Image: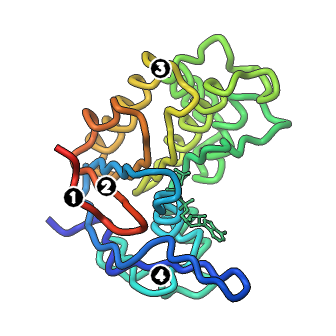
Amino acid sequence: MKPLLEARALTKHYEQGRISVAAVEGISFSLRPGEVALIIGPSGSGKSTLLSMLGCILRPTSGAILLAGREISALSDRDLPRIRRRCFGFVFQSFHLFPFLTARENVETALRLRKVPAASRRRRSIDLLEDCGLEERMEFYPASLSGGEKQRVAIARALAGDPFILLADEPTASLDSANGELIFKMLRSFAKAKGKAVVMASHDPKARGFADSVYNLVDGRIAALDA
Ligand SMILES: Nc1ncnc2c1ncn2[C@@H]1O[C@H](COP(=O)(O)OP(=O)(O)OP(=O)(O)O)[C@@H](O)[C@H]1O
């Protein structure tokens, strides 16, 4: 089966004045449709940098990213945002919700971008928020939601965008164990049902049980997994 996403010798060095920080060094892997990949590793090992490069938010210093066989890392600044919007979904540690929109409206924005007809946007948003256990919070603004609730709205919004690849940075960081498991289950069924792929960075010990592949980052490189 052709890989959905491939990273070839991905490297990122941050230049800070005269100092160069090697955040990611020569990482290669590929993801099949339906695959859930987990990135683990200590703080500062390069997980967020890798996710940002995979989602074309950050340009690699060298190496390539291929989406369904097409190199996207070499696209121009003009073409890249379109590919990013169409193909990738993101769940960041900091949620990035629109503060002036309710939970439901936040999810609806992703459906509007996909040009889903207005009549079905509301129903679809409600369904997704219910799946995330937020039936009581639909009309709340982000400021009135707990950290864990905001995180679930962000996940519902990312799923509403129906991306080919969903990139999630610590998707269960603010959640209790039961809600964390709910989110891992949702991410996994999203990948499996639709032949998409999920890449998540997580410290959550439960995450491994929901992943098909695990990459252990140490100092920006893939290291062997502990037994
Ligand atoms: N914008 C930046 N400029 C300079 N150095 C950076 C920048 N962003 C990250 N780094 C450095 O790159 C390395 C990798 O950082 P990154 O945030 O990718 O790690 P991480 O594994 O996601 O960490 P955490 O688990 O704490 O979120 C770290 O040494 C960090 O200090």
Instruction: Report the disc number at residue 73.
Output: 4
Reading the chain from its start, which is encountered first: label 2 or label 1?
A: 2
Q: Amino acid at mark 4?
A: Ser
Label 2 sits on residue: 216
Q: Position of residue 44 (x, y in %)?
A: 52, 58
Q: Amino acid at mark 1?
A: Ala
Label 3 sits on residue: 179
Labels 2 and 1 touching (C-beta < 8 A): yes
Label 4 to label 3: alpha-carbon separation: 35 Å
Instruction: Report the disc number at residue 63.
Output: none
Within 8 Å of ligand 1, the CB of disc 1? no
Q: Is residue 66 visible?
A: yes
Reading the chain from its start, which is encountered first: label 2 or label 3?
A: 3
Camera-nearest label, 1 or 3: 1
Label 1 sits on residue: 224
Q: Position of residue 104 (x, y in %)?
A: 68, 29
Please name the residue shown 58% across and 52% down the image: 114
Q: How many marks?
A: 4
Label 2 to label 3: alpha-carbon separation: 25 Å
Q: Amino acid at mark 2?
A: Asn
Please name the residue shown 67% across and 27% down the image: 147
Camera-nearest label, 2 or 3: 2
Label 2 to label 4: alpha-carbon separation: 23 Å
Q: Amino acid at mark 3?
A: Asn
Ligand 1 image position (quadrant): bottom right
Circle 3 packing at 10 Å, graded few (<14), some (14-19), many (20+), is: some
Indicate the colouring scheme.
Answer: rainbow
Q: Is residue 168 above or below residue 215?
A: above
